[in-house]
Amino acid sequence: MEAKEQTGKKSAIKIKIFGKTTCDACQAVKDKFNFFLNHWGLTDQAEIIYIDLDTVDGLSQGAYSDALEFPTTILEKNGQELARWKKTVPTSQEFRQFFKGDSV
């Protein structure tokens, strides 16, 4: 089941994080994106969606997205994949290029 970290926003970019509750790196990915989007003032440009691979719904979404390794982070814009990281926590330099803003 998808749990949205930030809701009610029309987002240009979806950040899909596929993980498990027992995975420290999965939590680190969520925390990192939340921190930097807030720090850069870009929370209105992104929606963070966490998909729990410990659930049936999450597992089926992971299989559909070829994202069963964890953490897997996928950035999408208008349904098109912009970037993907498997089994790693992306650095801010790796993902900031996908966001626009004066403070980036």
Image: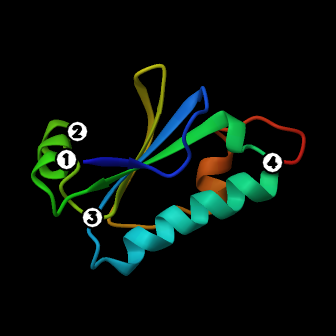
Q: Do the residues labelled 1 and 3 touch (CB within 8 Å)?
A: no
Question: Mark 3 falls on what kind of element?
Answer: loop
Label 4: few (<14), some (14–19) or many (≥20) C-alpha neighbours in 10 Å: some
Rendered image quadrant of residue 11: top right
Give coordinates of residue 33: x percent, y percent: 59, 58
Nearer-N-terminus badge (2/4) = 4
Q: In the figure, is residue 60 to the left or right of 95?
A: left
Disc 2/disc 4 C-alpha distance (Å): 29 Å
Counting labels gives 4
Q: In the figure, is residue 20 to the left or right of 4?
A: left
- Label ID, residue 70: 3
Disc 1/disc 2 C-alpha distance (Å): 5 Å
Which residue matches tag 4? 41
Amino acid type assigned to the residue bearing label 2 in the image: Ser
- Label ID, residue 76: none
Q: Do the residues labelled 1 and 2 touch (CB within 8 Å)?
A: yes
Q: In the figure, is residue 104 to the left or right of 70?
A: right
Instruction: Please report the residue visible at 19 percent of the width from the left and 47 percent of the height from the top.
Output: 62
Which residue matches tag 1? 62
Q: Is residue 20 above or below residue 3?
A: below
Which residue matches tag 2? 65
Instruction: Please report the residue visible at 18 percent of the width from the left and 55 percent of the height from the top.
Output: 68
Q: In this view, does 56 lie above or below 19?
A: above
Disc 1/disc 3 C-alpha distance (Å): 10 Å
Of labels 2 and 4, the one closer to you? 4
Of labels 3 and 4, the one closer to you? 4
Question: Mark 4 falls on what kind of element?
Answer: loop
Give coordinates of residue 20: x percent, y percent: 26, 68
Coloring scheme of the render? rainbow
